[in-house]
């Protein structure tokens, strides 16, 4: 094909046309500061509040003011975790999982170095949390539990509603990193029983550089930035109006297009099914069910995932070996290691993540190109050469 086939939508999505159109006035004529006293800025504030209402709708929030705009999912995660811990300085226990995004994982490691006790909940081979382990780890010293809604590498959905109900009964603050769930599955923060919920605009067709944190009314949290009065004093700094308005439009479109995710699921299942059928040296990383509809992660034994990605990129196909925030590392994904994926497969794992803009033709082309890439890499693989000496054959 003569255009890019983008199958790395868990890293970032294409900005929707309607989102771009909604942003343009605020990059040209309507450049007023929404915090200003004059009408030129006050009119812009109305658009910021409309965007807040739309994002609240995406999350099922009871009140618009429970949505706090930030610069990213990473900032929202840091705000949630650090903001709660600073409010409860005498409590020194954090519970999270072994498969969290670096925005939470590395922050928890920082607190661990500072003397906090951090419990990392294990997962099984399919990426499912050990729920009993998590629940039994909660004690009187637990300041916060932070769990992702859906894993960014495998798409596996965690039982956050059950966790939230358990924690709510015990008065333990609960943060959900929902960056990979928003726009892909229905979200109702009230049913999830959470106090805090993180999202990032560029995961559901808004621009990069804008995110939000849902803060349930009454949640005890302190800001991590200090300055002006913006966002009710919870997140100071002049508002990124074009980004916020665009995120609001993207949130409204995400709700509208949620039924389309079944078509995305069908495309994902066809891509995944054909890959598993075509190759005998490949396995699925993560559960087949209970995952977001757009993501598949497959591991090819005896070849390097980075090499697969480079060859695919030469043919106009963009995929990923895991989190974009961990790219450049030669180490196997910490998520796959936590799942116990064998070394020979973890190094050859790639993630395909689709969007509502993915087409049947793009899936067809990917399935046409991939066999030659895998065959070429197997031919030069020293690991596969050893396997052939043992009499093993690969079906292509």
Image (cartoon, rainbow, N blue to C red):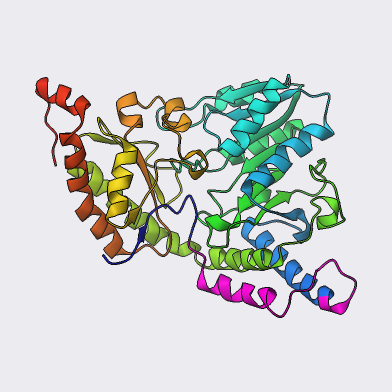
Location of residue 166 with respect to 38 vertically, above or below = above
Q: Quadrant of the C terminus?
A: top left
Q: Is 174 on the left or on the right of 311, as rendered? A: right
**Depth check, front residue: 154 or 322:** 322
- Disc count in the image? 0
Q: Position of residue 385 (x, y in %)?
A: 15, 26
Q: Residue furthest bottom?
A: 29
Magenta residue span: 14-40
**Depth check, front residue: 222 or 236:** 236
In this orientation, does residue 12 appear?
Answer: yes
Q: Residue at x 27, y 47 (%)?
A: 311
Q: Residue at x 55, y 74 (%)?
A: 18
In this orientation, does residue 193 appear?
Answer: no
Location of residue 4 with respect to 180 vertically, above or below = below
**Depth check, front residue: 32 or 215:** 32
Location of residue 33 with respect to 178 vertically, above or below = below
Q: Is 347 on the left or on the right of 18, as rendered? A: left
Location of residue 294 with respect to 157 vertically, above or below = below
Q: Residue furthest right?
A: 37
Q: Position of residue 120 (x, y in %)?
A: 58, 24
Q: Quadrant of the N terminus?
A: bottom left
Q: Is residue 29 magenta?
A: yes
Q: Is residue 108 magenta?
A: no
Q: Position of residue 383 (x, y in %)?
A: 22, 25
Q: Residue at x 60, y 63 (%)?
A: 251
Task: Name the image quarter holding residue 290.
Answer: top left
Q: Position of residue 237 (x, y in %)?
A: 79, 56
Q: Residue at x 46, y 48 (%)?
A: 292
Task: Name the image quarter holding residue 361.
Answer: bottom left
């Amino acid at each position: 094909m003569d255009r890019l086939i983008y199958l790395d939508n868990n890293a970032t999505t294409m900005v929707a046309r309607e989102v771009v159109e909604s942003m343009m006035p605020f990059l040209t004529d309507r450049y007023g500061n929404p915090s200003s006293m004059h009408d030129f800025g006050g009119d812009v504030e109305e658009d910021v509040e409309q965007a807040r209402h739309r994002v609240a709708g995406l999350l099922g929030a009871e009140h618009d003011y429970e949505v706090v705009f930030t610069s990213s999912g990473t900032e929202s995660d840091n705000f949630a975790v650090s903001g709660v811990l600073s409010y409860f300085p005498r409590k020194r226990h954090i519970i999270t999982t072994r498969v969290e995004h670096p925005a939470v994982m590395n922050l928890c490691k920082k607190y661990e170095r500072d003397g906090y006790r951090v419990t990392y909940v294990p997962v099984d081979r399919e990426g499912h949390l050990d729920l009993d382990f998590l629940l039994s780890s909660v004690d009187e010293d637990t300041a916060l539990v932070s769990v992702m809604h859906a894993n960014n590498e495998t798409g596996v959905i965690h039982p956050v509603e059950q966790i939230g109900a358990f924690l709510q009964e015990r008065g333990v603050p609960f943060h959900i990193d929902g960056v990979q769930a928003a726009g892909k599955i229905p979200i109702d923060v009230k049913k999830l029983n959470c106090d805090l919920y993180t999202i990032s605009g560029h995961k559901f067709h808004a621009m990069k550089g804008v995110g939000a944190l849902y803060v349930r009314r009454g949640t005890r949290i302190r800001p991590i930035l200090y300055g002006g009065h913006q966002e009710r004093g919870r997140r100071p700094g002049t508002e990124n109006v074009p980004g916020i308005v665009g995120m609001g439009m993207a949130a409204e479109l995400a709700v509208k297009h949620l039924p389309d995710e079944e078509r995305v699921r069908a495309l994902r299942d066809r891509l995944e099914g054909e890959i598993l059928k075509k190759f005998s040296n490949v396995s699925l990383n993560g559960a087949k069910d209970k995952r977001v509809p757009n993501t598949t992660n497959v591991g090819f034994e005896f070849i390097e995932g980075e090499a697969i990605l480079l060859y695919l990129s030469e043919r106009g196909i963009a995929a990923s070996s895991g989190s974009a925030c961990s790219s450049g590392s030669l180490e196997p994904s910490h998520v796959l290691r936590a799942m116990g994926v064998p070394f020979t497969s973890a190094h050859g794992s790639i993630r395909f993540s689709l969007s509502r803009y993915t087409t049947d033709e793009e899936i067809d082309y990917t399935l046409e190109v991939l066999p030659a890439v895998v065959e070429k890499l197997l031919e030069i693989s020293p690991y596969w050469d050893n396997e052939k000496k043992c009499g093993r054959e690969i079906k292509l």
